[in-house]
Amino acid sequence: MAVTETGVADHVSREWAAGRGGAIVTANVDIVRAATRDPALAALVARAELVVADGMPVVWAGRLAGAAIPERVTGSSLVHTLAGRAARDGRPVYLLGGDEGVPEAAARALLERYPGLRIAGTHSPPYGFDADPAARRAVVERVREAGPGLVLVGLGFPKQERLIMELRPELPAAWFLGCGAGIAMAAGQFSRAPEALQRAGGEWLHRLALEPRRLLRRYLLHDAPFAVRLLTGALRARLRLLGR
């Protein structure tokens, strides 16, 4: 369903009240590109209860194709919006992902911003843990024992979505957000782009300036050309629809 950021929080609140959990995928250009190339990743995205457009090219392409996408909804914004809603609804939050010390710093920032928020736990799994079944299971058990109502998972796609699918049967009434760099941003490790640049679809330039070595190849060689193809394909689909 097409939904605003506030609508996401309202939906999660209603589901919490009904005792139902779920997962949210924040689909940016990189995730959409990966899902179009790999049916298994597309199926992984499709298993989420909510998929929101995180990235202006995704919003523009959807609108060009005729979808009623009301606004961009980013993982980094949802970290705050859902933490605020969790504080209001009395649901403890678990922060999973980021460099050592980062989820703890993010937790402190969220606690300061949202009075009444309860932190169920924090954890920064070691690099490569997901390739070791025993280490992955230890992470799942650690989160399960904490009993959170909201789990923020910042491990990057598709690692975070795969782990979420392992966690869901253990915490069927919890909601999970795959938030990428959202935990690091909440901790102040990275800053968001100015709002005007976000609206113009240029937040990727801001991220590229912050992490050029990690993001240069991904953004310029893969995501940017795919975004052009995505928008071109959406425009063609719209023109075909109008020509009927």
Image (cartoon, rainbow, N blue to C red):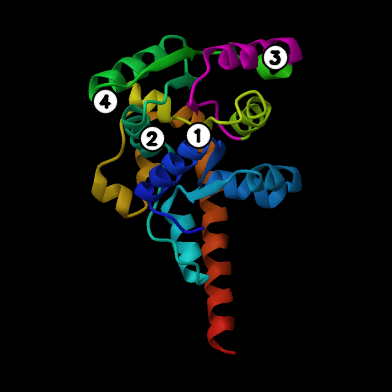
- Please tell me whether residue 136 is drawn above or below residue 2 in the rendered image: above
Spot occupied by residue 98 in the image (x, y as percentages of width and height): 47, 19
Q: Kindly identify which numbered label has been placed on residue 177.
A: 1
From this viewpoint, is residue 222 visible? no
- Label located before the other in sequence (3 or 2): 2
Q: Kindly identify which numbered label has been placed on residue 82.
A: 2
Residue at 53% in and 30% down: 174
Question: Over which residues does the magenta segment extend?
Answer: 132-157
Side of 210 where 134 appears, left or right: right
- Please tell me whether residue 160 is drawn above or below residue 139 in the rendered image: below
SS state under label 3: helix
Quadrant in the picture for the C terminus: bottom right
Spot occupied by residue 38 in the image (x, y as percentages of width and height): 73, 46
Tag 1 near tag 2, CB within 8 Å: yes
Per the model, the C-alpha gap separating discs 1 and 2 is 9 Å
What amino acid type should be assigned to the residue bearing mark 4? Answer: Tyr
Q: Which residue is mark 4?
A: 114
What amino acid type should be assigned to the residue bearing mark 2? Answer: Leu
Spot occupied by residue 220 in the image (x, y as percentages of width and height): 51, 45
- Label located before the other in sequence (2 or 4): 2
Per the model, the C-alpha gap separating discs 4 and 1 is 18 Å
Residue at 37% in and 30% down: 86
Q: Which residue is mark 3?
A: 137
Per the model, the C-alpha gap separating discs 4 and 3 is 31 Å
